[in-house]
Image: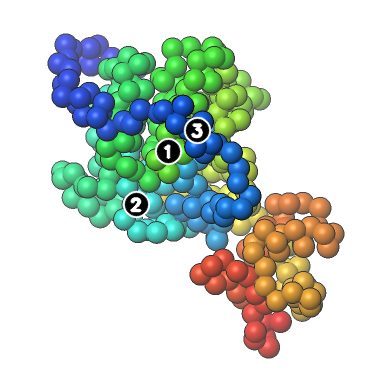
């Protein structure tokens, strides 16, 4: 076990940092919000679809303005998965993970590890991105908050987000924003804070939390875990068998990620490129969508659909499984039967050999 005593040295607090944070964090004026009624839904307005930082096979991951959760037992590869996610967001691609845009900014907030280990993980990300390991990069920051108390951690988290304006925040150790993860009111307060920060700053906040210790219980720990699953839009479970780490999306509020993802740890301690784990069920779906008239039936009376509209039509045609319906759309796109444009509108591919 690592000796924590080496970290318990007297520290000098840089109060100028807190001055910067105080200036950067805007005060929330509830009276003004009530006057504006900016919490009321206006159906005359257009509400944009979720903006995802990453895609896998055309399906989005890590929605900006929302909260995500990564769970797993201890030592199952959660940190390696996060390393790969961050590298994909910053560098544009990591195996099956593809960034949806360019020049994204990422902030890692680690509340559990000492500064040496946080720096080591940050250097791994630099290496995956092809950046110098001994130089800082303007689009990536990491902070180590193990030596701070709960209130200080919350204040620094809020301040760093306000200062850096990241597109993605990795919160490795959400439990350390709580004094007691079994305390329901305090857990609610933490998720209320994260919900506000993600929405006000249009950032994705991805939280890492352990599962319960029992081998038969995969729920996240405590009342904090319950509140997190209630508020998050995506949840990913990380498991490890032998040297293969598998990631499965277990919760999605929008389009679910049908595919499981897999990677291994190389001899140098770096994650291999994440790949899609092809399953028998997915292969059977591909055989279904390859039938000549399968897609034509949906385009007789309508020439184009959004992904959600096409999903609804497939369900109405007899598909009973929502996940399979989305998987059919992805397979149709991959097989060239369907075409999707830059506005995410899907049409039937106009080729004789694709119909």
The numbered mark at residue 104 is 2
Q: CA distance from mark 1 to mark 2?
A: 17 Å
The earlier-in-sequence mark between 3 and 2 is 3
Residue 78 vs 304, above or below: the answer is above
Q: Which mark is residue 127?
A: none
- Which label is found at residue 200? 1
Q: Quadrant of the N terminus?
A: top left
Mark 1, Cα crowd under 10 Å, few <14 / some 14-19 / many 20+, is few
**Which residue is located at x 27 percent, y 17 percent?**
147
Cα–Cα gap, marks 3 and 1: 18 Å
| Quadrant holding the C terminus | bottom right
Estimate the x, y position of residue 353 in percent, counting from the top left: 67, 86
Residue 36 spot, x, y in % from top left? 49, 37
Please state which of residues 55 and 112 is positioned toward the viewer in this rendering.
55
Residue located at (31% from left, 51% from top): 128
- Residue behind mark 3: 35
């Amino acid at each position: 076990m690592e000796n924590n005593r080496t970290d318990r040295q007297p520290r000098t607090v840089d109060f100028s940092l807190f001055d910067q944070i105080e200036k950067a964090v805007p005060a929330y004026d509830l009276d003004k919000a009530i006057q504006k009624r900016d919490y009321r839904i206006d159906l005359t307005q257009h509400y944009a679809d979720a903006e995802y930082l990453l895609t896998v096979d055309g399906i989005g991951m890590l929605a900006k303005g929302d909260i995500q959760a990564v769970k797993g037992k201890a030592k199952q590869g959660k940190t390696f998965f996060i390393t790969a996610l961050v590298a994909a967001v910053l560098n544009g691609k990591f195996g099956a993970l593809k960034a949806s845009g360019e020049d994204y900014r990422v902030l890692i907030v680690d509340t559990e590890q000492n500064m040496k280990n946080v720096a080591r993980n940050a250097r791994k990300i630099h290496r995956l991105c092809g950046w110098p390991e001994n130089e800082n990069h303007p689009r990536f920051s990491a902070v180590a908050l193990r030596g701070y108390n709960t209130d200080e951690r919350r204040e620094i988290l809020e301040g760093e987000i306000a200062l850096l304006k990241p597109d993605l925040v990795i919160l490795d150790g959400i439990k350390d924003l709580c004094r007691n993860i079994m305390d329901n009111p305090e857990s609610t307060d933490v998720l209320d804070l994260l919900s506000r920060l993600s929405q006000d700053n249009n950032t994705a906040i991805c939280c890492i939390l352990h599962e319960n210790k029992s081998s038969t219980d995969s729920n996240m720990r405590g009342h904090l875990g319950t509140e997190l699953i209630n508020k998050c839009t995506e949840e990913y479970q990380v498991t490890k068998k032998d040297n293969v780490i598998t990631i499965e999306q277990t919760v999605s509020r929008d389009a679910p990620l049908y595919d499981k993802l897999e990677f291994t740890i190389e001899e140098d301690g770096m994650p291999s490129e994440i790949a899609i784990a092809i399953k028998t069920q997915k292969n059977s779906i591909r055989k279904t969508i390859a039938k000549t008239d399968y897609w034509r039936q949906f385009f007789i009376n309508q020439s184009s659909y959004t992904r959600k509209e096409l999903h609804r039509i497939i369900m109405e045609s007899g598909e009973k499984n929502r996940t399979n319906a989305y998987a059919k759309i992805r397979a149709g796109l991959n097989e060239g039967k369907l075409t999707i444009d830059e506005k995410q509108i899907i049409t039937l591919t106009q080729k004789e050999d694709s119909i």
